[in-house]
Amino acid sequence: MSGIGYFGIVVLALLGLVVGSVHGDLRMNYYARSCPNAEKIVQDYVKRHIPNAPGLAATFIRMHFHDCFVRGCDGSVLLNFTASTGNQTEKVVVPNQTLRGFDFIDRVKSLLEAECPGVVSCADVISLVARDSIVTTGGPFWRVPTGRRDGSISNASEALSNIPAPFFNLSALQTSFANKGLDLRELVLLSGAHTIGISICTSFANRLYNFTGVLGTQDPSLDSEYAANLIANKCRTITDNTTIVEMDPGSFRTFDLSYYRLVLKRRGLFQSDAALITSSTTRSYIDQILNGSLENFFAEFARAMEKMGRIEVKTGSQGEIRRNCAVVNS
Ligand code: HEM
Ligand SMILES: *[C@@H]1O[C@H](CO)[C@@H](O)[C@H](O)[C@H]1NC(C)=O
Ligand SMILES: *[C@@H]1O[C@H](CO)[C@@H](O)[C@H](O)[C@H]1NC(C)=O
Ligand SMILES: *[C@@H]1O[C@H](CO)[C@@H](O)[C@H](O)[C@H]1NC(C)=O
Ligand SMILES: *[C@@H]1O[C@H](CO)[C@@H](O)[C@H](O)[C@H]1NC(C)=O
Ligand SMILES: *[C@@H]1O[C@H](CO)[C@@H](O)[C@H](O)[C@H]1NC(C)=O
Ligand SMILES: *[C@@H]1O[C@H](CO)[C@@H](O)[C@H](O)[C@H]1NC(C)=O
Ligand SMILES: *[C@@H]1O[C@H](CO)[C@@H](O)[C@H](O)[C@H]1NC(C)=O
Ligand SMILES: *[C@@H]1O[C@H](CO)[C@@H](O)[C@H](O)[C@H]1NC(C)=O
């Protein structure tokens, strides 16, 4: 070996560890010593149960996104109301009370607590469950460095102000993502998660019935044939908050490129989807994604997910390792 040699590499590696811990970085396989089976326990549980409930994969990647956008990826999305968490938690408002799967997360967490009590954070459980469920349903793999610690505050009004709304235009989306260190390309890539999953009508009914604030007006950026179809067969009233609609009809379980094709056809379900073709920059990102292979999209999506998973994480001595994901340790 030439150059800096073996000794140099060891020194650099040690330095890396020191710098890493000072910066409180996440790292791959963080639990290798403290709970060697942790990642396997999560993966096994997901592989056993997600095939029976594949729709949860969409819920979990969305839960991870919501967790990361409010006070960083700190598991705060899982907290129940208690006097100490604030008077309304993210769960209460999280747009719009359609997040599910909390019990699934709780079961994974209790397996981990049985194996190594007080070691694996709820924030890491969400991150790992989201990745493993997407992989189990045939979607992209991304790296999940671990070592996140759990927060103790969950605040409904912060959730409302940090999670982008479906009626956001491009500049509002750009600002929302930029506030979390994510750029326009990452906005386009991560929006690609809407290739799976469902929405309730109330998340977009204004586009069908009341776009300008006058009843009977529609969003001109939504394909009129598609709008007519939604009105006739799905969202029959503006207040329908129970009917669910596939966001990528026909392949809403398959993580593929068809979301971007729909957006180009003006059939994205939300204004936030439609917004992605309102600038030449984001429009060309979509053209590039569609011009490339699925593998290429997966690789780029993976980098964006790994970055999202690092937003404002608590590490080292910050936060805590919650024993029960729904409540702060007493
Ligand atoms: C760009 C801003 C975004 C907006 C405005 C937005 C908005 C929404 C809304 C309104 C829903 C439907 C919720 C409901 O009515 O039940 C939804 C669903 C979903 N979102 Fe997003 N989202 C955004 C970005 C993301 C990102 C970054 C991800 C993940 C990386 C994501 C993943 C999902 C998934 C998978 C679903 C389906 C959930 C399910 O089937 O349970 N979204 N989104
Ligand atoms: C948290 O809230 C959910 C739903 O309201 C409930 O089922 C669960 O038992 C609660 N968990 C704790 C630990 O209070
Ligand atoms: C929640 O956050 C908002 C905005 O930051 C703040 O004004 C409010 O006091 C917080 N509520 C609680 C209960 O901490
Ligand atoms: C919740 O907090 C808001 C503002 O922080 C306050 O106006 C409201 O009274 C509180 N509600 C409860 C039930 O504590
Ligand atoms: C949640 O739903 C209410 C009405 O059902 C709506 O006014 C509000 O804008 C929705 N919030 C988001 C973020 O979608
Ligand atoms: C986007 O939305 C924001 C906030 O609602 C608004 O201030 C802005 O004028 C809108 N921009 C465009 C280009 O419509
Ligand atoms: C239509 O939109 C306007 C303006 O946003 C709002 O005040 C009104 O309540 C909406 N009507 C319905 C039926 O949702
Ligand atoms: C749906 O609407 C009904 C009636 O307006 C309301 O009681 C219920 O809480 C709503 N559900 C959700 C999830 O918003
Ligand atoms: C699509 O790919 C071809 C060949 O790889 C390239 O020449 C072309 O410029 C690309 N178009 C876009 C819009 O990226």
Image (tube, rainbow, N blue to C red):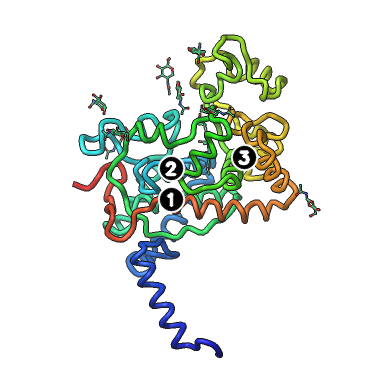
**Quadrant observed for ligand 6 in the rendered image:** top right
Instruction: Determine the image quadrant of residue 93.
Output: top left
**In the image, is the residue at mark 3 within 8 Å of ligand 1 by its beta carbon?**
no
Between 161 and 322, the residue placed more toward the observer is 161
Between discs 3 and 1, the one toward the N terminus: 3
Between discs 1 and 2, the one toward the N terminus: 2
Residue 260 showing in the rendered view: yes
The CA distance from mark 3 to mark 1 is 23 Å
Query: Up-down: is 203 above or below 294?
Result: above
The amino acid type of the residue labelled 2 equals Phe
Q: Residue 112, which numbered label?
A: none
Between discs 3 and 2, the one toward the N terminus: 2
Report x, y in % for residue 282: 65, 41
Between 20 and 102, the residue placed more toward the observer is 20
Q: Secondary structure at mark 1?
A: loop
Between 170 and 149, the residue placed more toward the observer is 170
The CA distance from mark 1 to mark 2 is 7 Å
Q: Residue 69, which numbered label?
A: 2
Instruction: Determine the image quadrant of residue 267.
Output: top right
- Please state which of the two labelled residues, at mark 3 or mark 2, is closer to the viewer: 2
Quarter of the image with the N terminus is bottom right
Q: Residue at 61% of width from left, 54% of height from top?
A: 300
Question: Label 1, on which residue?
Answer: 311
38 displayed left or right of 201:
left
Question: Label 3, on which residue?
Answer: 195
Q: Secondary structure at mark 3?
A: helix
The amino acid type of the residue labelled 3 equals Thr
**In the image, is the residue at mark 2 within 8 Å of ligand 1 by its beta carbon?**
no
